[in-house]
Amino acid sequence: MVEYAQQHYNVDNIFYEVLDIAGDVSDFKEEWGTFTKVFSFYCLHWVKNLRRALRNIHSLMKNGGETLLVFVAQCPVFEMYERMADDGKWKAYMQVR
């Protein structure tokens, strides 16, 4: 997605960079500082350590900053993936854990 954005929406004042939000964000914060606004649309439900991701988002925000987080809290498709991962027929193909 980032590569696509760089190729199709290249604007001088917008920078695209990959960041593992549940990882160590200290180098990113040192390079870019903190932000007044943080947006995430349909990404955080893929993060395994959501607690750490939210702490990192908080640490990347300026005091009084705003954030908008949109994510899937519950979805039957994810339950289906879990069941398929337990089924012998699909287990080899389903690495959701």
Image: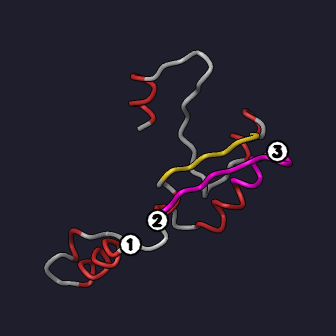
Q: Quadrant of residue 78?
A: bottom left
Hey, which quadrant is residue 97 in on the image? bottom left
Q: Badge 3 is on which residue?
A: 62
Q: Image quadrant of residue 31? A: top right
Q: Mark 1–mark 2 contact, CB under 8 Å?
A: yes
Left or right: where 31 falls relative to 10: right
Is 82 displayed left or right of 30 in the figure? left
Tags 1 and 3 in contact by the CB under 8 Å rule? Answer: no
Under mark 3, the amino acid is: Lys
- x, y percent for residue 80: 28, 77
> Residue under circle 1?
75
The residue sitting at the top extreme is 12
Q: Where's residue 92, x and y in %?
A: 21, 72
The quadrant of the picture occupied by the N terminus is top left
- The secondary element bearing badge 3 is classed as strand
Total label count? 3
Crowding at mark 1 (Cα within 10 Å: few <14, some 14-19, many 20+): few
Cα distance in 3D space between marks 1 and 3: 32 Å
The residue positioned 35% from the left and 70% from the top of the image is 96
Q: Main secondary structure of the magenta part?
A: strand
Specify the segment rendered in magenta. 57-71
* 59 inside magenta stretch: yes
Q: Position of residue 63 (x, y in %)?
A: 86, 48
Q: Inspect the magenta stretch and tell me whether residue 49 lies in it.
A: no
Q: Amino acid at mark 2?
A: Val
As drawn, 36 above or below 70: above
Q: CA distance from mark 1 to mark 2?
A: 7 Å
Q: What is the three-letter code of the residue carrying label 1?
A: Cys
* Residue at which label 2 appears: 72
Q: Is residue 72 above or below residue 5?
A: below
